[in-house]
Amino acid sequence: MRTRREIVDTIMTEWESMAMCPRQQFWGEPSITVAGVEITSEEVILRYQRMNLEERLPAVETFKTCEDFPHLDAHGDHANGRCCDACHGPYEIYEMSVVPLPEGGYAWVCCAMDRAIRPEWHRVRNERFAKTARGKLWNRIFKERG
């Protein structure tokens, strides 16, 4: 388990150590657009990202994390119970999810662990998505690649 503060501080420290943000290595100077205003100050961008992350996390003291679920087989998308490298990579600030736990409380986990924790929720969501226009298009595309 990790505290809310540990999660936020760890992610923001990692972000700062990556020369502001992962995009900067590809596109040069960092900037974000908020309400139509481009912001280029690294300090302001970091404060904004911290605020967004803090808003995403419910106001509870502790969260379970992927490490707290060694008994689950997260093989839905990733073999051998492994976590998702994309979620745990440089975009963790965007990719990780807050998942309500059946026994109460919350977890801060990657997509693979989310699927292992809530298989029924994902099954229903996927069935609903498959019936949408976008879902039908995706199914057709992936069947053709099959």
Image (cartoon, rainbow, N blue to C red):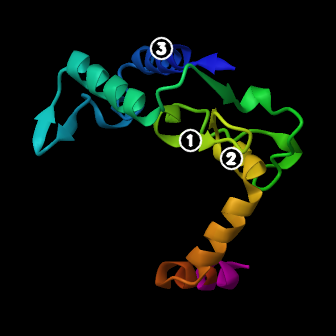
93 in relation to 113, above or below: above
How far separated are the C-alphas under marks 2 and 1?
Answer: 8 Å
Number of numbered discs: 3
Task: Report the predominant secondary structure element of the magenta stretch.
Answer: helix
Q: Position of residue 8 (x, y in %)?
A: 47, 20
Picture coordinates of residue 11, whole percent (x, y): 49, 21
Q: Which residue is mark 1?
A: 97
**Alpha carbons under labels 1 and 3: distance apart:** 17 Å
Q: Residue at x 77, y 27 (%)?
A: 68
Give the amino acid at mark 2. Answer: Asp
Left or right: residue 112 compared with residue 8? right
- Residues drawn in magenta: 140-146
Secondary structure beneath dot 3 equals helix
> Which residue is the site of mark 3?
9
Within-10-Å neighbours for mark 3: few <14, some 14–19, many 20+: few
Classify residue 136 as left or right of residue 19: right
> Does residue 68 appear to the left or right of 41 in the view shown?
right
> What amino acid type should be assigned to the residue bearing mark 3?
Asp
Element class at badge 2:
helix
| Callout 2–callout 1 Cβ contact below 8 Å | yes
Which quadrant is the C terminus positioned in? bottom right
